[in-house]
Amino acid sequence: MADQTIDVLVIGAGQSGLAVGYYLRRTGLSFVLLDDQLEPGGAWPCAWDSLQLFSPAEANSLPGWLMPRPEDNGFPPRDAVTEYLTQYEHRYALPVQRPVRVTHVQAASTGFVVLTDHGTWHARAVVCATGSWRNPYVPSYPGQADFGGMQVHSSGYRNALPFAGKRVLVVGGANSGAQILAEVSRVARTRWVTEQEPRFLPDEVDGRVLFAQATQRYHAQQGTTKAPPPPSLGDVVMVDSVKEARRRGVLSSVRPFSRFIATGVVWPDGQEEDVDAVVWCTGFRPALAFLAGLGVVQADGRVATTNTRATALPGLWLVGYGNWTGFASATLIGVGRTARATAEEIRTWLLAPPDAAA
Ligand code: FAD
């Protein structure tokens, strides 16, 4: 690969990379997607066994092809999403090479040199679509290193079995926290630790409402509507397992502890509590370590962008990391819009005369 320069190299072939690939196919540019996993599906195969989308299949589709509905007509489980992404990749014959891990991206006169564990690539433009699953965030608490119990981030959680009979803190007040709490509390004594009181959506709505509300807020922000942004209805979607946890009375939460001790935690009122395990459902940061040498990654792990393009470095784009790389771009349904705009921007930029493209 060292001798050949391709037009566009996409790093990551999860839902974001595939959506970008879908639109790049239409541009006539040469491109390849590099992904470090053995199998298709991005982060989805790594999620916990019982993970279920919180809206129906058709509300979670990538451009071009609706996700098939599960036979029971319910919300798709984890493996159905993986299967959909696998078929999507084949359906559109997207040129994915795996497993190839990108280690460094360097700027060059012709664009970029991309170093990987399987050789070096040259590309005129680079799209980062590596998501955040590989970069879990765990907050730090005093005494954490002394704690002798088990600690696992939601990215490493598979099911409740290792927690059976234990005293477990589930930390984090969003959907992953609620779903993991619902599951672990069936076999363990749990306490749910959240910064604020969690905000539950009404039972009768699903994740589509979150998307619709975010859309309205986006338009209000852009000034494309005169309507004021709607008040938020809540964050936690009441999927069946979370409703069932509420019926069991385990869905109440407490504010964070002050520090760890070897055997557990100390609460703000000074009370000590023995704890066997902590499950951190505290989110993720962008997985962009391979950009370190370019000097564009900020302290918060993000890159300053204009739309999806790195503001300070022509030729570099970022897709799928959240609202800062395009409204709702970290969702299956939302990433298509920014993927399309990105492919179009890249095409225009690469076809522009060299001094205009500089
Ligand atoms: P990923 O899926 O992480 O794909 C990135 C790929 O790049 C991976 O294969 C990764 O291994 C690879 N990669 C990373 N670094 C490198 C490197 N250096 N070199 C090569 N390859 C690399 N989303 C929805 O749309 N609908 C939902 O209902 C929904 N529900 C969710 C529920 C929960 C509880 C959670 C936790 C998440 C949910 N999500 C949902 C969000 C979704 O899981 C992620 O946002 C999504 O996986 C992001 O896709 P991506 O393609 O950007 O990143």
Image: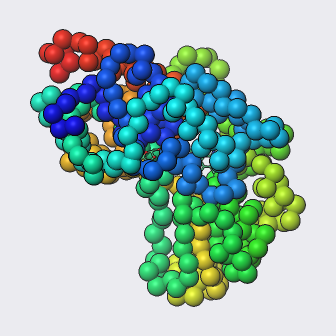
Q: Residue 157 in the image: x percent, y percent?
A: 59, 64
Quarter of the view holding residue 4: top left
Q: Is residue 140 left or right of residue 32?
A: right
Quarter of the view holding residue 75: top right
Residue nearest the observer in this picture, 254 or 322: 322
- Name the residue rendered at 75%, 62% in the picture: 182
| Quarter of the figure with the C terminus | top left
| Quarter of the figure with the N terminus | top left
- Name the residue rendered at 82%, 54% in the picture: 243
Q: Residue 276 in the image: x percent, y percent?
A: 62, 82
In this rendering, the answer to whether 158 lies above or below 355 is: below
In this rendering, the answer to whether 19 lies above or below 345 is: below
Q: Residue 141 in the image: x percent, y percent?
A: 48, 73
In this rendering, the answer to whether 139 lies above or below 283 is: below
- Name the residue rendered at 27%, 52% in the picture: 117
User: Does residue 311 show up?
Assistant: no
In this rendering, the answer to whether 103 lies above or below 228 is: below
Residue nearest the observer in this picture, 28 or 154: 28
User: Does residue 68 show up?
Assistant: yes
Q: In this view, does 321 lie to the left or right of 268?
A: left
- Name the residue rendered at 66%, 57% in the picture: 49
Q: Residue 64 in the image: x percent, y percent?
A: 58, 21
Residue nearest the observer in this picture, 36 or 145: 36
Q: In this view, does 346 lie to the left or right of 17?
A: left
Quarter of the view holding residue 168: bottom right
